[in-house]
Amino acid sequence: MTLIELHQVSKTYRTHGAVTEALFNVGLKVDKGDIFGVIGHSGAGKSTLLRCVNLLERPTSGRVIVNGKELTALREKELQQERRRIGMIFQHFNLLTTATVTENIAFPLKLAKWSSSRIRARVDELLELVGLRDHAGKYPAQLSGGQKQRIGIARALATNPDVLLCDEATSALDPQTTQSILQLLLDINAKLGITILLITHEMHVIRSICNRVAVMDGGRIVEEGDVLDVFLKPKHAITREFVGQVSEWPDDQFAYAHRGGRLLRIHFVGESTYEPVLYEVVRETAATFAILQGTVSRMKNTPYGQLLIELRGETADMDRIVDRLRDRGVDVEVVS
Ligand SMILES: Nc1ncnc2c1ncn2[C@@H]1O[C@H](COP(=O)(O)OP(=O)(O)OP(=O)(O)O)[C@@H](O)[C@H]1O
């Protein structure tokens, strides 16, 4: 089921006579339960895109549909109602500095006119969910960046939204804290079934938690797909650059002296990563192989392995090995 749809969304900013076209005819579909990542360089239009989803920024043209409701067609009052079903967290947390953790989390519930007893019960649940029970009475300034983002997450989830929008939510955090916040987002997605749309300029964020990714450049989506597919077969130059950020392959991967064999780049995805597929297939022939490079990593919950090998043997045997590997579902690229 599609939860978020953008149809031909364009956004032009006009400030003091200057015109900036931030989005051009962007189309996007995010399914229920997705963790959908949008990646791009600074100025690509990611923030504008994200803010168009809850109409913090109104598109110049195009339609935005969330949960089957066309937000771009709603009146202000109905829009406010629908916005409660869309939570948002920010890079710099946007907390009320003069309010305690509890008061920050309770804030949207007060706006939604919940009774104080319901608010108390809900805030307790949220404190538990984000692991801040022991800090309820503290002020944001007394907490670390990671803890502040946890307050942001609890506040965003307070009204039980269906969608969580994340605007560079981990960019201000150190690597270890980033991992704990990403893990929390994964847990929330799994436990509450909440759909997450995030923007980032860091490919490791996409690799850690997203199942879908869109790559933006110059106000357009230039590539989109399942994270695994985009990682293993990036098409656009910008995508290849982002994938390169997290590649375990050194740049000089092809700088091996060629000894007359056949160089293969092999990707194993899923359970085949842990199976002796290569050994079994080569053993059926008189050929041998040398491993030149290899890694095993994880993309969200899917293991994947990459190997650079050199096959040595008769041409017919080497052809057969490539065919048999492909038969067994292994992705093989003949490099030379
Ligand atoms: N409120 C605004 N008024 C005028 N121009 C804007 C406004 N917001 C963004 N822009 C311009 O629109 C373009 C896209 O900006 P946007 O912030 O959406 O990109 P981004 O990919 O999120 O970049 P960053 O990661 O640096 O925030 C940029 O050229 C930016 O200068």
Image: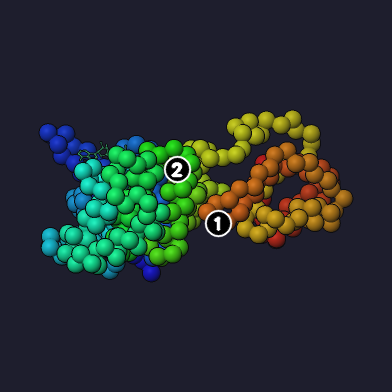
Question: From the viewer's perspective, is 126 left or right of 232?
Answer: left
* 272 vs 93, nearest the viewer: 93
**Dot 2 amino acid type:** Thr
**Residue 319 visible here:** yes
Q: Residue 320: x percent and y percent?
A: 78, 54
Asked whether mark 2 and ligand 1 are closer than 8 Å, the reply comes as: no
Q: Quadrant of the N terminus?
A: bottom left
Question: From the viewer's perspective, is 114 left or right of 88?
Answer: left
* Front of the two marks 1 and 2: 2
Q: Using the image, tell me which numbered label, if any, was put on residue 301.
A: 1
Say how the picture is coloured: rainbow
Q: Is residue 249 above or below residue 64?
A: above
Q: How far apart in space, not on screen, are marks 1 and 2 (Cα)?
A: 20 Å
Q: Residue tagged by mark 2?
A: 177
Place residue 270 in its image quadrant. bottom right
Task: Say which residue appears at 29% left-offset and 50% top-offset.
Answer: 137
Q: Residue 100: x percent and y percent?
A: 26, 48
Task: Say which residue appears at 78% left-offset and 41% top-offset.
Answer: 290
Identity of the residue furthest to the right in this view: 286
Place residue 20 in its image quadrant. top left
Q: Quadrant of the C terminus?
A: top right
Task: Say which residue appears at 21% left-offset and 49% top-offset.
Answer: 57
Place residue 6 in its image quadrant. bottom left
SS state under label 1 = loop
Q: Residue 322: x percent and y percent?
A: 73, 52
**Dot 1 amino acid type:** Asn
Q: Residue 148: x percent and y percent?
A: 34, 45
SS state under label 2 = helix
Does label 1 or label 2 sit earlier along the sequence? Answer: 2
Q: Is residue 42 above or below residue 284?
A: above
* 115 vs 149, nearest the viewer: 115
Ligand 1 position by quadrant: top left
